Image: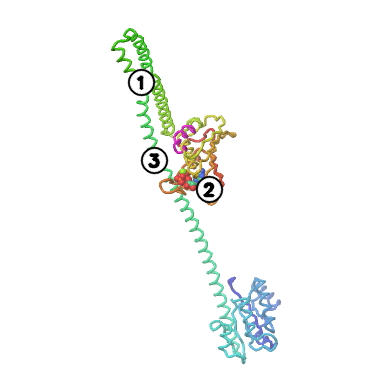
Amino acid sequence: MSELSNRRILLIDDMPSIHDDFRKILAPPQAHSAELDEMEAALFGEQTQPERPIFELDSAYGGEEGLGKLNLALQEQRPYALAFVDMRMPDGWDGAKTIEHLWQQDPQLQVVVCTAYSDYSWDDLLNRLNAHDRLLILKKPFDNIEVKQMANTLLTKWEMTERASLQMHHLEHLVDQRTAQLKQASEALQREIDERKQLEGQLVQSEKLASLGQLAAGVAHEINNPIGFISSNLGTLDGYFQQLLTMLDAYHSAEQVLAGSQTALQLEHMREQIELEYLREDVPLLIKESKEGISRVGQIVRDLKDFSRIDNNQEWQWANLQQGIESTLNIVASELKYKADVVKDYQVLPEIECLPSQINQVIMNLVVNAAQAMGPERGTITLRTGTQGETAWIEIADTGSGIAPDTLQKIFDPFFTTKPVGQGTGLGLSLSYGIVKKHGGDISVSSELGSGTTFRVQLPLRQTRPAA
Ligand SMILES: Nc1ncnc2c1ncn2[C@@H]1O[C@H](COP(=O)(O)OP(=O)(O)O)[C@@H](O)[C@H]1O
Ligand SMILES: [Mg+2]
């Protein structure tokens, strides 16, 4: 017998004689006795199992008592498979009400209603119990084989229903499991897609940067040459002019010899016309300014070269962070000029092992973001640096718009931008994040809406793994 097999039957009837009849039919007294068993064991040499009664019959003499027994059976997890319920029970619940209660507790229970006559028409009863397809009717006086067959058939039905429902549960469980697996797979896929997108973004950006860097480096190199000869020429020119002045002074003294002559008058006239005295003062000034200008161009070119230095070999280099910050600030000076004052609060930093042009790129992104966060009013961007243990840190604090808390979680996502098309690509921070992580560092942000934002970049002083 399988463990699903259930032979438990509950009989609810107010007449004790009916219980006797049922017991005779469904649970006849055992043919075995202990004595017989012993004899059998002696004869056949094995312990015979007492034959199980075909049915396990319990009695209740009213609806309420029946419900009590059903509940107990449920509690003990030994539910009844079948109940025979008498229709007419003068005290307490009648059959219909009893069945209603039984089914409320245990919808699986198979029920046979037994009756000689009823207070309901059959249709009313079936309607009331909503049981056109699940209630059998046994009319008194009943036939033994009818009762036995009903019991047999309904117990098998109970078993099959139970089996089906177990299988259903199993299937549901399987479906849940598969759904969960599918969900996991789809989440993993989404993560992969996101990562890929981010990598793609970084690639696009670093391609752009690399070609920009190459261009800048090329232009810087080309400009360097003319800057060189212009500034050297300016130096020479300065010297020549001093010599010319000496010569002019000499001529001026020689003019005394010609005093009063026509020529002297002409010279005097010319001197006034070209404002010689003014020229003497202005030319050196012009030369000085030009020298300053060209030296500034020289500085810009050097910054550009420094900033865009292409780390061809992608190997860590020892670099001065401070220098990187300064050249980066020079590069973005025009972006900052009308937006904010820059305050510098630096501590002396040792050289750190990094990819310098990429770190410059991070600083530039943060500084440009800070400038772009300013409203119509001029703000302040404060740059702080320092070291802490084995790390160097840079802080870029602005007095700009600040970032709303729900936006804050998204700012490092590739392509996330709150800026109008053309102004923002949404790649600056995701790229910076990637660069800092590649350095084994960390980038964090704290912000207050309406007051400003501070980004903090932490970088290890030295690297332990290869850069590539
Ligand atoms: N200093 C800052 N102040 C306010 N918002 C900022 C700041 N830095 C970044 N953000 C927010 O983060 C978003 C993403 O920045 P970023 O990745 O550099 O892309 P983009 O600048 O092209 O928009 C910005 O659009 C902006 O909303
Ligand atoms: Mg940006």
Mark 2 Cβ and ligand 1 under 8 Å apart: yes
Residue 64, quarter of the rendered image: bottom right
Residue depicted at 65% across the width and 89% down the height: 88
Q: Amino acid at mark 1?
A: Glu
Mark number, residue 275: 1
* 138 or 214: nearer the viewer: 214
Q: What residue is shown with label 3?
A: 208
Percent position (x, y) of residue 303?
A: 43, 31
Mark number, residue 403: 2
First-in-chain label (2 vs 3)? 3
Magenta range is 324-337
The Cα–Cα distance between marks 1 and 3, rounded to whole angstroms, is 54 Å
Question: Residue 333: within the magenta?
Answer: yes
- Residue 274, compared with residue 340, is above or below; it is above
Kindly state the secondary structure of the residue where label 3 is placed.
helix
* 376 or 451: nearer the viewer: 376
Q: Nearer the viewer, mark 2 or mark 1?
A: 1
